[in-house]
Amino acid sequence: MIKMTVIIRRIGYKGPVSSFNGAPPPQHTFGASMAGIANANMNGGYGYSYAMQPPPQPAFGRGQPFVAGGGFRGRGGPPNFQYQHPPGSNPYKYVAPKPPPASPDVMEKPMGPEEVALLNKFLHKKVDLMQNSGIDVSLDRSDPRSPLHSIRSFRDLRLRPELLEALNVLGFTQPSKIQEFALPLLIMEPPTNIIAQSQSGTGKTATFVLTMLSRVDPSKKYPQCLCLAPTYELAIQIGDVVAKMAQFLPDVAVHYAVRGVKPSAPITEQIIIGTPGKLVDYLTKYNCLDASHICCLVLDEADVMINQAGYTQQSTQIYNIIEEASPIVQTMLFSATYGEDVVKFAMQLIKNAVTVTLKREDQSLPNIKQYFVECPGRDAKYQAVVELYSGLTIASCVIFTHTRRSASWLAERMIEKGHLVGVLHGEMSVEERAASIEQFKEGIFKVLITTNVCARGIDVSQVTIVINYDPPLLYENPSEPDYDTYLHRIGRTGRFGKAGIAINFVDSREALAIIKKIEAFFGKPIPKLDPSDLEQLEAVENG
């Protein structure tokens, strides 16, 4: 198993941005992932931004049910927000950004894992397993090395008819590899505890949601499934998936154990989704959650939940309470990354757990073509970007740099050439970053320049190329490659089985040594590419 600790930082400058007061993004039908982002100008990012004004909304709580798909009831959730143009605004106005001020030329420090997990799910407002990419993954499914490879259908898994109907409506017929291997274990009798790892974008959330909905008895009005998430926003995103999957189960209801929701005893909803601190209060302070009938306990983003100060104690306390109260509980841990210390702790905590993980060589997604380009300096790097754009068909591109200064300089040069560019910087909140990424997903700008802010958590089907302007290095030891971050960076392309390209710029012998170490670590060749050679670029694109 490979430890994949995600490192995120923000790019930064506090300058003005161009604004695009265009058509508002779709209203989220289950929760408000971008609640409270008013007039989000990104506080210094390039490209465009929406002006978003949430209208007044009533307070939310258990008395405000949400109805989805004619059946599912969600209670205790947040209000929905609508996005509107400012009065008198021009919906197609574009204002060119000003040049950025100088920024420190130092590698940015990683963010905490709970913020990483938040951004990872902040963007998943729709059930996004394989359908949302709008691509045919049949070729990828024929390759057993692919994490999307599957030889079964959901019907072979003998799911309840209501779930099969929902999957059919959502357009899902074949499970991904993690679903194919994990779901039979999870829905079999007797229940099996599991520690599961799979790449982002391969259906982990749907796996445990389908398990909960397979185990729940809609006729019983008491808590049966408990799902822990590190943050409020992640809990809401999981609820969104539950709403989609449970649309033909009218008697299934969700209660959110999150901030802003006052508990009232007894809780009658079958599925409880919440944060660890709030759930500890439910179980010990308020005594409003009867744990004796809990049959499913899920820890999403488990690497954060059991390896972060505060979360570890709370998650362990919840697990021990549930284990003692319920004789039938099934425990499930899901994450894209696990360190060896996390797995060791989890195996000690959870009884007789089955582990489902990826081999290291499977983690360097086989549908991504990886290359390196020799660039002796930043001008050569910029020229390489120009040549790649001239020789390749690039729908959209993510460029990763070490420093804010590099990102700002490159963004300014690309804007001068007429490219629509967005930059994520160090002063942006998680909500602002998510809003900026939404604009990138919607195609408002085609180039996103960042450090590791987007190393994890963005699913954009049209990302055709990822450029490592600087190779990923360990923050604590900059002379060594950060393999986990490299994997998450290149994983921004090649989503859901679609072919992708990752280009690594090499500006020194030390940088070349880093690429060679990455090549050896994953066991995947990274050949040299000449971006000025149009025939070679054509072979890359069509090969």
Image (spheres, rainbow, N blue to C red):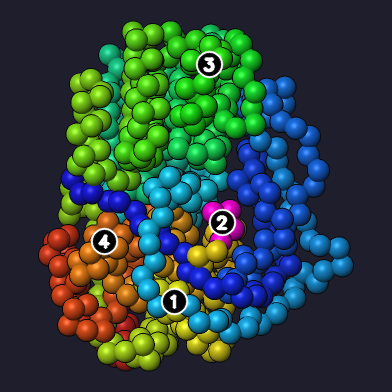
| In the foreground, 512 or 214 | 512
Q: Which residue is mark 2?
A: 429
Mark 2 Cα shell of 10 Å, populated few (<14), some (14-19), many (≥20)? some
* Residue 428 position by quadrant: bottom right
Question: In the image as oriented, which residue stretches furthest toward the right?
Answer: 88
Q: Residue sitting at 53 percent across and 16 percent down?
A: 285
Chain-order first, disc 2 or disc 4:
2
Q: Which residue is mark 1?
A: 104
- Disc number lying in front (2 or 3): 3
Q: Which residue is mark 3?
A: 285
- Disc number lying in front (1 or 2): 1
Task: Assess whether residue 24 is covered by the magenta stretch.
Answer: no
Where does the image place residue 372, in percent across and percent down from the top left?
Answer: 25, 78
Please indicate, yes or no, whether residue 536 appears anywhere in the rendered image.
no
Chain-order first, disc 4 or disc 3:
3
Q: Which residue is mark 4?
A: 476
Say what secondary structure mark 3 lies in.
helix
Name the quarter where the N terminus is drawn.
top left
Compared across the picture, whether 432 is left or right of 480 comes to: right
Q: CA distance from mark 2 to mark 3?
A: 32 Å
Q: Is residue 355 above or below residue 149?
A: above
| In the foreground, 171 or 465 | 465
Q: Residue sitting at 66 percent across and 82 percent down?
A: 96
Q: Is residue 85 above or below residue 147?
A: below
Q: CA distance from mark 1 to mark 3?
A: 47 Å
Q: CA distance from mark 4 to mark 1?
A: 18 Å
Chain-order first, disc 1 or disc 2:
1
Q: Amino acid at mark 4?
A: Glu
